[in-house]
Amino acid sequence: MIAPGIKRGTAELAVLSVLEDGPLHGYEMARRIEEQTHGSLRFTLASLYPLLYKLEKRGWVRGAWETSNGGRRRRCYRLTAEGKKKLAPIRREWDELFRALKRLTKVSHA
Amino acid sequence: MPDWKALVEQRLASLALEPKEKAEVIAEVAAHMEEICEETLRLGITEEEAVQRALSRAGNWRDLQRKISAAKRSEEPMKKRVWQLWVPGFLTLILSMLFLTSLYGLGLRARLVWSGPSAILLYTPWLAGLPFFGALGAYLSSRAGGSRANALFVSVFPALALAGAFLLMFPIGFAVEGITGRHIDFGSVAAVLLKDGIGWILIPAAALLVGGLLAHALLSTQSSSQRTAMG
């Protein structure tokens, strides 16, 4: 498991990335992130919804109530054009950070 | 299956949001909890245990409440108030006064209704246009995320401003009396203001409110039908 402090920084990237594949409601979003990271990233309600509301305020995601075939109402979030635009530089930043850390740890191991 | 909405509502009771926004958050979190519970039930455990597990997986409720409030209120409350109350309020006031001035310019005058001492001066063309301005104010406030109370306050704002102006007559009168030393009969002033208040404040307020209520009802119907259509 990854420490909460590190996870906090990655949460934005995780949510935006998972929404890139299509609209999702909160539960499904949390489930997919957990599944795709093999349980390393796990969202609680307190970490997921405040983040979603912040992203919605920034205009990066848009939430709308939808009713499933079974009649269940859920709020689905989709990535907006603005969100898509923001995702690319965030990805680049994280990629740079990962590479830098990798270089650093290799140096440390040497 | 428990009533998740009630359970979540109980735990997020102090969520400091507008009622509509709060209800939406509760519905969303309740739907999430229900999914967690169903997922846990599929593992073959008892419902009671599934509910407990779902509640514990939610994390710290107080923390959730605080973080949601902070996320939703990231826009400064002062800024929010400006766009939900003051900008649409003053715009409604200015436009309704410009309308009044234009009518005067066109030569349309106020008319006395009834005769004798109970006669009231009514400006019918102006009154006929006021529901539109009330509706406009309510629409602008609602569009900025204002509550029903905000929208209705904005719609009657011109009448409230006029009432304020009428009430200013008293301190001004006291000041004039103090400066000039001339006695002012405040009883007569009050009687005149009360009578004029009917035609210039009460009836206009009602006309503005009709427009505000209609606009708000229309917007509420539209938003609920949009939500139904999404399903």
Image (spheres, coloured by chain):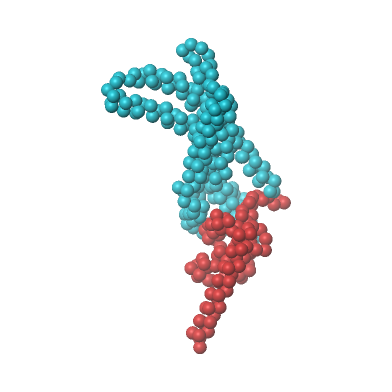
Task: Pick whichever, B219 or B113, lies toward us.
Answer: B113
Task: Say which residue appears at 55% left-offset and 45% top-offset.
Answer: B144
Farthest-out residue, right: A69
Farthest-out residue, top: B116
> Measured from the top left, where is residue A26 in percent x and y?
60, 57
| Colour seen for chain A | red
In the displayed structure, would residue A65 be above or below residue B220? below
Task: Pick whichever, B19 or B190, lies toward us.
Answer: B190
In the displayed structure, would residue B79 be above or below residue B209? below
Task: Say which residue appears at 56% left-offset and 64% top-offset.
Answer: A12
Residue B143 shows in the view: yes
Identify the image quadrant of residue B54. bottom right
- Tally the marks: 0
Identify the image quadrant of residue B228. top right
Task: Say which residue appears at 61% left-offset and 53% top-offset.
Answer: A63
Task: Pick whichever, A96 or A16, lies toward us.
Answer: A96
Residue B147 shows in the view: no
> Measured from the top left, where is residue A44 in percent x and y?
54, 61
Q: Which chain is cyan?
A: B
In the displayed structure, would residue B38 be above or below residue B110? below
> Measured from the top left, where is residue B124 in percent x and y?
56, 23
Identify the image quadrant of residue A90. bottom right
> Measured from the top left, where is residue B92 in percent x and y?
53, 36
Task: Pick whichever, B200 or A98, lies toward us.
Answer: B200
Task: Say which residue appears at 27% left-offset and 22% top-offset.
Answer: B181
